[in-house]
Amino acid sequence: MKKYLFLILILSFLFTLNSCTNSNKYIKETTNFGIKSAKKGYWKEAKFRWEKLVKEDPDDFIALNNLAVCYEVEEDFETAKEFYSRALELQPKNKYIKINLEKVEALLFAKEQDKKQTE
Amino acid sequence: MIMKKRITLLILVLSFLIFYSGSCIHTELVYITITDDPKIKLDPDATIVVHNFWLNAKDDPTLTFRPEKEISQKFRDVLEQEETLKVLPRKSYKRLNKLFLTAVEEKSLSILSYIEKQDLSWVEVTKDEPCDYLLLGETAFEVVDGSGYEYRRIYDPFSRTYKYKEVFVKQKIFNIKVTIILIDVKKNKMIYEDIYNDSRIEAGDVESNLTQFLWLSEFSVERFISSFTPEIEKQYRYLLGR
């Protein structure tokens, strides 16, 4: 009896583990497919993939960062900044997100200065 | 009992490996294109008139432009006001062609500038005119006789050695200088000047090279245009992978 119980326990554990890895696999595949698309210049496709991930998990800092890059490509720097900031809040030590955020902030600052000069 | 321990350990190791590989982050460096500020900052709503660059502005709308915008009616109206702004048809080209072909031993010929001197219509543009910037072109051609002796290595099949022979080569050196000037009409001030030089040594005749020169000049205009339309700069951004 004990033997069977132990077997059921192991099987259920493996089943949960499998479903977990499947969802991990899906996230990994979607992220990397987005990267592949972005590298080829299909930014809309990449954006679609990462938006999907953010909808499913709003705390996915990787998808948030990548989505911000998409917004930068579209020249929507304000939204890009928002997404980078959110990603950095979730992962304050990530240097890559930090660099991305600094760059978009610099761009926004330069644009503001230009606007002031033209006015 | 030992078996159970081993299985539990195995499960723990496996689950750690699976979860670890799933959450492992590596970064991929990709660059994205972000438009950068143009070299010359012009008002995006400004009207620019490409004047007298032996390009018929009416025929070639790509050279009568606003940065990244279509030609407005305002601009078309300016072009049609021939009394104030004479945008020449290919008159310059024809004249240039004629002058060039009749010249035998050509020296420096500032043909277009000569034509400009005959037609200083841009001076007539006053503050009231609906034109902000004026793009003028000045081209100078120079054909120099580059004929002379050249040493050529020739293979002698009898002695099976290479010999050097003095050969007279008839050739011409074609020099082109394109000056592009941008004038702020409202302030009556030159705000930009770009000089493009090119030189070629060719054995061909003047006529065949003329087309090339014209192409070069048009290329210079395009180069100039791109200098004040937003440039695309490669900027690096990090995309995160899993």
Image: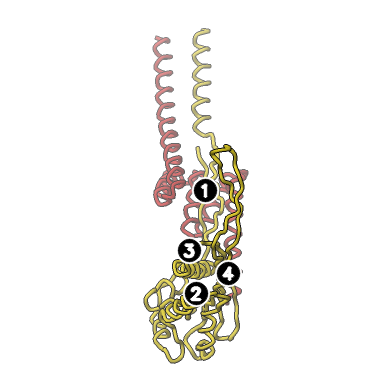
Residue at 62%, 43% (x, y): give it: A93
Residue B50 visible within the image: no
> Tag 4: Cα neighbours inside 10 Å, few (<14), some, or many (≥20)?
some
Q: Are marks 1 and 2 on the same chain?
A: no
Using the image as rendered, state which of residue A84 and residue B172 is in the foreground: B172
> Tag 1: Cα neighbours inside 10 Å, few (<14), some, or many (≥20)?
many
> Tag 2: Cα neighbours inside 10 Å, few (<14), some, or many (≥20)?
few
> Tag 3: Cα neighbours inside 10 Å, few (<14), some, or many (≥20)?
few
Q: Which residue is mark 4?
A: B144
Cα–Cα gap, marks 3 and 4: 13 Å
Using the image as rendered, state which of residue A118 and residue B66 is in the foreground: B66
> Horizontal and vertical percent for residue A37?
42, 45
Residue at 43%, 14% (x, y): give it: A6
Q: Amino acid at mark 2?
A: Pro
Indicate the secondary structure of the residue bearing disc 4: strand
Indicate the secondary structure of the residue bearing disc 2: loop
Chain A rendered in what hue? red
Q: Which residue is mark 3?
A: B204
Labelled disc at residue A65: 1
Q: Amino acid at mark 4?
A: Val
- Compared with B27, B68 (above or below) is below
Using the image as rendered, state which of residue B148 and residue A22 is in the foreground: B148
> Which chain identifier belongs to the yellow chain?
B
Q: Amino acid at mark 3?
A: Gly
Query: Does label 2 or label 3 sit earlier along the sequence?
Result: 2
Cα–Cα gap, marks 1 and 3: 59 Å
Residue at 60%, 80% (x, y): give it: B190
- Residue furthest to the left in view is B59
- Compared with B109, A113 (above or below) is above
Cα–Cα gap, marks 4 and 1: 61 Å
